[in-house]
Image (cartoon, coloured by chain):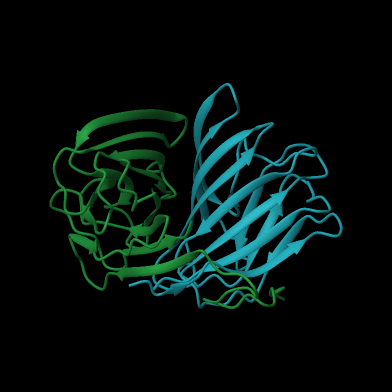
Amino acid sequence: MLNVISGLLSGGAAAGGGTSYESIATYSLSSAQSAVTFSSIPSTFKHLQIRALTRDSGAGVYNTYKVTYNGDTASNYSVHAMYGQNINTVDQFGNANQTGMVVYATPSAVGSNIFGAQIIDILDYADTNKYKTQRSIGGVSENNDNNLITVMSGSWRSTSAISSITITANGSTSFQQYSQFALYGIKG
Amino acid sequence: MAAGATYTPIATTTLGSNQTSYTFSSIPSTYTDLVLVVTGKLTTSAYDTALRFNGDTGSNYSRMVLTSDGSTVGAGRSNSTNIMYIDANGVKDTTFNSNDIINIMNYANTTTYKTVLSRSNNAATGVDVNVGMWRDTSAITSITILAMSSGTWATGSNFTLYGIAAA
């Protein structure tokens, strides 16, 4: 039996308190789509979180996708990552002057029921005094030798408040049906 | 644009006695993701802990881990196991309460396999980041948290389950 906590109702607040985590918008794809955009993001939160399940149409084992802010596709992004792959393969990389934040891991040419997961935190997104920092964990376990787990960070060299986020599938691929992108706001 | 508050506590328990496992059952399907927060220690030495969904004891689980023990970083995978391991060096021990934050994504959908992202942390033994897969399209209605290798969860260990509902 569930030991349900009384006084805390779905979507509501505890007596005398409030919740600081709110759903903003969600894309659940009913057909293939190359990109999704969250626009008109309110500036009333402290941080944002994207929770994604992805699969794309590529031919590789797994792919990346790209996150860009406010439509900026110039080379204003940098990323750093460490990752584990299969049996005792550990590595890292860092890339400056990118055209978006690269995020792993989206499976491609595997069983159709397999989706990679990513949780992306975008910190202090509405602050106009600092560059924006993103961090994420993501991975996919395919029950074979195609497994990947990543820890990543990134920076967008702009002091603009983030009001839109575009998530674009790798190259000419598309996100497949049942891919999902949910945006949440966290209050400070 | 905001659609509503979420990250709702579903259930919590603090063990009043040593137990080999604890199960959250009758999990409602009304959320998008689940977050399971574990804070606890074991009564024996440092052992792995693991998850099992809907009581499935088949070899339908896998996981990939990136792990560190303070001197070495490593990676490993476990395929076709009958449990989903959630730690490697961030294991539970008998002295320090260690913690896991486990994200169970899109747990109620009946179309895709279930993907789990988690972090395990023990200041004395190490840290892990994991991805796991349960190869089943059933909605998850119960989660069992297991202590492995004849270990038992110690009195005072806490398990809390949250639900996150997308707009």
In the rendered view, does A77 fall on the left or right side of B59?
A: left
- A69 and B36: which one is in front? A69
- A85 and A186: which one is in front? A186
- Residue extending farthest to the right is B17
- Indicate whether B58 appears above or below B98: below
Rendered colour, chain B: cyan
Q: Quadrant of the N terminus of chain A?
A: bottom right
Image label count = 0
In the rendered view, does B82 fall on the left or right side of B15?
A: left
Residue A61: give x, y in percent of width and height: 29, 46
Q: In the picture, which chain is green?
A: A
- Residue extending farthest to the top is B71
- A63 and B80: which one is in front? A63
Residue at x-position 67% and y-position 77%:
A7
- A21 and A168: which one is in front? A21
Image quarter of residue A113: bottom left
- Indicate whether B159 appears above or below B119: below
Residue A179: give x, y in percent of width and height: 31, 64
Residue at x-position 29% and y-position 63%:
A41
Residue at x-position 37% and y-position 43%:
A146
In the rendered view, does B63 fall on the left or right side of B99?
A: left
In the rendered view, does A73 fall on the left or right side of B20?
A: left
Residue at x-position 50% and y-position 78%:
B30
Image quarter of residue A18: bottom right
Residue A120: give x, y in percent of width and height: 39, 51
Image quarter of residue A152: top left
- Indicate whether A28 appears above or below A135: below
- Indicate whether B74 appears above or below B36: above
Residue B122: give x, y in percent of width and height: 66, 37
